[in-house]
Amino acid sequence: QVQLVESGGGLVQAGDSLRVSCAASGRTASSAAIGWFRQPPGKEREFVASISGSGQTTYYTDSGKGRFTISRDNAKNTVYLQMDTVKPEDTANYYCAARTNSYISGTISAYAYWGQGTQVTVSS
């Protein structure tokens, strides 16, 4: 079992930077691949970024490449999503999720454990 708690969301202006965090706990938390997903208002949940258990491999959706950076601190069992030059279309509830192995994936169904989400709102 892995428990996940997101934090760091809020209201920011377009062009600002924001970092959201995902605190993971549980026996396999430090080795699990972690993904960030988001769900804009009225839309489906979508993949944003993923990081392997070791932190050496990352994978981004095209909309996040160059603006978003995923990283992890396994000593703190925390995964971060740094969002730079945010846009109004980045407005969404951001979720982190954990796999039962250490390999990255952009597929929602590949993730077994989910947090409750943190809201990010970007004003224009």
Image (cartoon, rainbow, N blue to C red):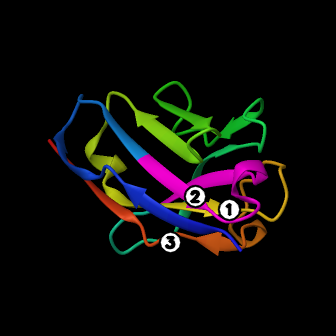
Quarter of the image that includes the N terminus: bottom right
The magenta stretch spans which residues? 21-38
Count residues near mark 1 (Cα–Cα under 10 Å), then give few for <14, some for 14-19, many for 20+: many
Q: Verify whether residue 30 appears in magenta.
A: yes
Please tell me which residue is depicted at 43% across the width and 34% down the height of the picture.
82
Count residues near mark 2 (Cα–Cα under 10 Å), then give few for <14, some for 14-19, many for 20+: many
| Mark 1 to mark 3 CA distance (whole Å) | 19 Å
- In front: 59, or 113? 113
| Mark 2 to mark 3 CA distance (whole Å) | 24 Å
Q: Name the residue under label 2.
A: 24
Q: Name the residue under label 3.
A: 44
**Quarter occupied by residue 53:** top right
Residue 61's spot in the image, x, y percent?
Answer: 61, 43
Question: In the rendered view, does 27 fall on the left or right side of 90?
Answer: right
Q: Verify whether residue 59 appears in magenta.
A: no
| Mark 2 to mark 1 CA distance (whole Å) | 9 Å
Question: In the rendered view, does 88 fall on the left or right side of 84?
Answer: left
Quarter of the image that includes the C terminus: top left
The kind of residue on which mark 3 rests is Glu
For marks 2 and 1, the one nearer the N-term is 2
Q: Are marks 2 and 1 in contact (CB under 8 Å)?
A: yes
